[in-house]
Image (tube, grey):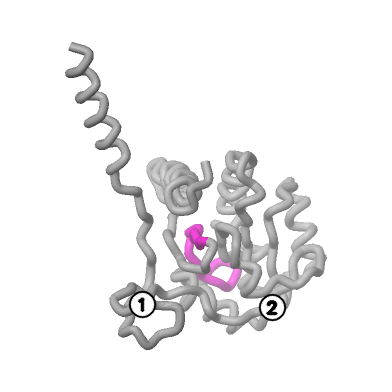
Amino acid sequence: MKYLFGIILMFVLLACESKPKYVLPHLGHHEIATGTEAGFNKGDTIFDFIEEEFQFLTQDSLPFTNKDLEGKISIAKFFFTHCPTICPPMTGQMDKLAESTKDIADKLQFLSFSIDPERDTVNRLRVYMDRHGITANNWFFLTGEKEAFVHHLGTQSFFINAINEPNAEGGYAHSPHFILVDRTKHVRGVYDVLERDGKGAENLKRLERDIRRLLNEEYDEK
């Protein structure tokens, strides 16, 4: 009987060990390496990543560049401070996420890119943060690049809509999505955090699960 139990236990352990890891998708274009690309072997999959070079200023007037995306998981959104519609609830949702991920705060950074950098000065960003009670040390509000470039960055690199729209309230139209970017600047998910019928809250929870899956499954950090 003990022998039989031992065999059963062995198969259970093997089944657990052989369970495939959950891998988040890589969004964007991908291609198969031919063997001539630096850092890749023939047959490797090459995924799109955020390669646009940029230099923003944070709410503390510190530079934030493309290189600052490396080494941390980033959760990004695009907004503007005088937005009268979706920006305040988006900010509220990001604040909830920052609060619920405090235990892994050193591995994450939250990014709010202004799509109206001319009006959204560093001082205005600080006022906006104070108004919304934002205190997370790993949350950066970013301004300083040209407006057209920020819109291009949102559309081409982060897969969200960010454009001038005279007929929209506030003069801009942008997506109500958070973007999950991994440590090597690959976009791994886009989440509508304001979707109706309670789905926005569900999407926010799914985003947190995916963040933790990245840490646990791909980076082996429990």
Residue 199: tell me if it is visible. yes
Q: Amino acid at mark 1?
A: Asn
In the current view of this chain or complex, which residue is farthest to the front?
3
Circle nearer the viewer, 2 or 1: 1
State left or right for residue 125 relative to residue 28: right
Q: Nearer the viewer, residue 113 or 168?
A: 113
Whether residue 193 is visible = no
Q: Bounds of the magenta span? A: 167-182
Which x, y percent locates residue 135? 74, 47
Q: Is residue 136 left or right of residue 220?
A: right
**Among the 4 quarters of the image, the one containing residue 47:** bottom left
The percent coordinates of residue 191 (x first, y second) are 44, 55
**Numbered label attached to residue 55:** 2
> Which residue is painted at 49% across and 75% down in the image?
157
Amino acid carrying mark 2 in the image: Gln
Query: Relative to the observer, which residue lies in front, 51 or 4?
Result: 4
Report if residue 171 lies within the magenta region.
yes
Q: What kind of element bears circle 2?
A: strand
Residue 181 placed where, x, y %?
A: 51, 62
Q: Residue 20: percent from the left, percent from the top?
A: 30, 47
Residue at 69%, 60% (x, y): give it: 140
Residue 44's place in the image compared with 97, above or below, is below
Return the disc, 2 or 1, that comes first in the chain's sequence.
Answer: 1
With respect to residue 157, does 78 lie above or below?
above
Q: Quadrant of residue 114?
A: bottom right
Residue carrying label 1:
41
Mark number, residue 60: none
Q: CA distance from mark 2 to mark 1?
A: 32 Å
